[in-house]
Each structure stands twice: as C-alpha cells, then as structure tokens.
C-alpha cells in the first residue's frame, strides 16, 4: 500500500533539510578548535606607567577614566597596552593564540594613525601618531582569520598641538662658538647654505636647532630625542657624531677634497626602540 504525504509534511521536510544545510555551512565558515575563541566584553588601555588610561565596556567608555585618546600632532603618543574585561568587568590578559591579531578601523585616517614597532604588528601595544589637528574615532578588533572575536565599539581620538608637537620643522646648523649660522633645511627638500672645511681639518662644534615653521620650539627631551647625521660620501667628509652630553651637536672632518652632502634625521627613543620622527634635506659640504 502506498503512503501518501500531505502538503504539510512536504513543507516540514523541506524546512528541516534547509536548516541542516544552513547550520552545516555556518559551522564550516566559523569553526574554532577548543580554546581558540577569545571571549571579552570590554577593553582596558594602560599607559606607559601601567595605569588605566581608558576603559570601554560593552561599547561604553567608562567615565571613571579618560573619555578619549589624545595624540600629539606629528609625534607619537606614549605606548598604550591593551588588556580585556570579562562579563564581570574583571581584567584579563590578551589572547596568546598567534592567529588572533589586534586590528583597528579609524573613521578619518587623515587625522590620526596607529603605529606599531616593526615585528610587533598585530600585538597588544601601540602608539598613536597625530597627522592633523581634529577629532575622529577608532574601533579595535580581535581579528581571528576572517572574523572578529571581539570589537570595542567606537572610541573618540583627538589630535592636539602640545609642547612636543613637531609641525613642518626646520633644522638650523649653527657654529657653537661664533653663533654663525651655517645652513638650514626642512623636511620638504629645501636647503640653504652649506659647510666648508679644510682638508684634514675639523669644524668647531655644529649645533643643530629644531624649530617649527611658525617659530615655536618643540620640547625635545634629550633622554628621548636624538639626531643621526650621515654623509653621502664618507671618503670626502666624515661626521664626529653627537655625544651623550651634547646630543644635538657634531663635527665634520675634511678627508678628501671635493663636495658631498650630509643628511640629518631626528629620532625618538621609545621603550628601547628608535623611531624616525623627521628627515631633513641634505646640506652641502665643501672640503678644500
């Protein structure tokens, strides 16, 4: 005897079949081996002293701490270290799974950018670099393959001018003893003047002074900032580099008659690593 299927039975069977296929598809697209998925309900951003700078929980910035990130214009902020919060607001360390990376999305990337040291990309420490004054937002993610295990929600960021702001800088080279100005250069390829030194002779101390184009002088703590000077042809002229006592002064030695250039770069030492802040146009050296 043949069994008859009602229309209702056909619909139920079809629905069940589609559901099984859908669940199977989802499980293939978003699978985790045991222990790989990282659960978080919030994030904590610690400053360089390991104190809580900013905290966000379930998309809301905690009013007990900073309401936003602050980044200096044309300079790096201090380091921010990221930890996370569980459902009870208890702090937890970042995931140790190397396949989970810290990523971010900035609403207006013309205002600010995230900087991480080479070899530490995707890790849980970063700096903010202000590109122009203004306010935007940033959202952080724990990215695991093609999906996110966690997202912070949007956090305000403001870029400001402060005492460390380096804005369109100019470097001026001055004879330390006579106060005569040898030359100057900016970061856009413009240079004026030059240095002349006799063969087998050494210049007096040349002091490098860095100012902003608007005349303000950024505060460059010698414990953090230093310059590096190299010549394009070291057979013509050599540099006696800055010392610890005078980190912005150097000498030039004439080694062979001819003309070359020297180039100065400004660095900032952050947590034992040297970060380039500015590179200035080359200045001519004549050895006669």
Image (cartoon, rainbow, N blue to C red):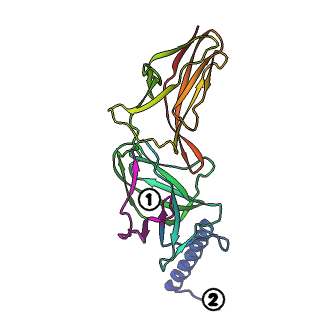
Q: Nearer the viewer, residue 27 or 154?
A: 154
- The label on residue 139 is 1
Q: Which residues are magenta?
A: 44-72
- Residue at 63%, 49% (x, y): give it: 119
Circle 1/circle 2 CB separation < 8 Å: no
- Residue at 55%, 74% (x, y): give it: 18
Q: Position of residue 93 (x, y in %)?
A: 58, 69
> Is residue 8 a member of the stretch shown in magenta?
no
Q: CA distance from mark 1 to mark 2?
A: 62 Å
Q: Position of residue 25 (x, y in %)?
A: 60, 69
Q: Quadrant of residue 97?
A: bottom right
> Is residue 62 a member of the stretch shown in magenta?
yes
Q: Nearer the viewer, residue 11 or 44?
A: 44
Left or right, 142 with reference to 67: right
Q: Residues within 10 Å of mark 1 (few under 14, many from 20)?
A: some
Q: Position of residue 8 (x, y in %)?
A: 49, 85
Q: Residues within 10 Å of mark 2 (few under 14, many from 20)?
A: few
Pair 1/2: label in front: 1
**Which residue bears the numbered disc 2?**
2
Q: Could you tell which of marks 1 and 2 lies nearer the N-terminus?
A: 2
- Which quadrant is the N terminus positioned in? bottom right
Left or right, 90 with reference to 28: left
Q: Please say if 139 is above or below 203.
A: below
- Residue at 49%, 56% (x, y): give it: 104
């Amino acid at each position: 005897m043949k069994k008859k299927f009602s229309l209702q039975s056909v619909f139920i069977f079809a629905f069940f079949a589609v559901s099984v296929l859908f669940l199977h598809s989802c499980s293939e697209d978003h699978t985790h081996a045991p222990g790989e998925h990282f659960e978080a309900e919030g994030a904590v951003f610690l400053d360089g002293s390991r104190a809580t700078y900013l905290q966000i929980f379930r998309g809301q910035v905690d009013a007990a701490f900073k309401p936003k990130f602050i980044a200096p214009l044309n300079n790096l902020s201090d380091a921010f270290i990221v930890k996370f919060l569980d459902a009870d607001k208890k702090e937890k360390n970042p995931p140790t799974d190397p396949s989970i990376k810290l990523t971010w999305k900035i609403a207006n990337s013309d205002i600010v950018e995230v900087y991480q040291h080479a070899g530490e990309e995707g890790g849980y420490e970063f700096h903010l670099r202000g590109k122009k004054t203004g306010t935007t937002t940033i959202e952080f993610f724990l990215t695991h393959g093609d999906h996110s295990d966690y997202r912070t929600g949007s956090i305000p960021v403001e870029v400001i001018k402060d005492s460390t702001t380096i804005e369109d800088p100019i470097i001026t080279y001055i004879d330390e003893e006579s106060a005569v100005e040898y030359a100057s250069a900016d970061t856009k390829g413009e240079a004026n003047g030059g240095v002349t030194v006799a063969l087998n002779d050494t210049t007096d101390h040349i002091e490098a002074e860095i100012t902003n184009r608007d005349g303000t002088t950024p505060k460059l703590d010698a414990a953090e900032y230093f310059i590096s000077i190299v010549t394009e042809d070291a057979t013509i002229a050599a540099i006696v580099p800055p010392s610890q006592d005078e980190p912005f002064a150097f000498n030039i030695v004439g080694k062979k008659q001819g003309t070359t250039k020297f180039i100065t770069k400004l660095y900032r030492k952050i947590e034992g690593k040297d970060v380039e802040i500015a590179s200035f146009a080359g200045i001519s050296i004549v050895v006669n």
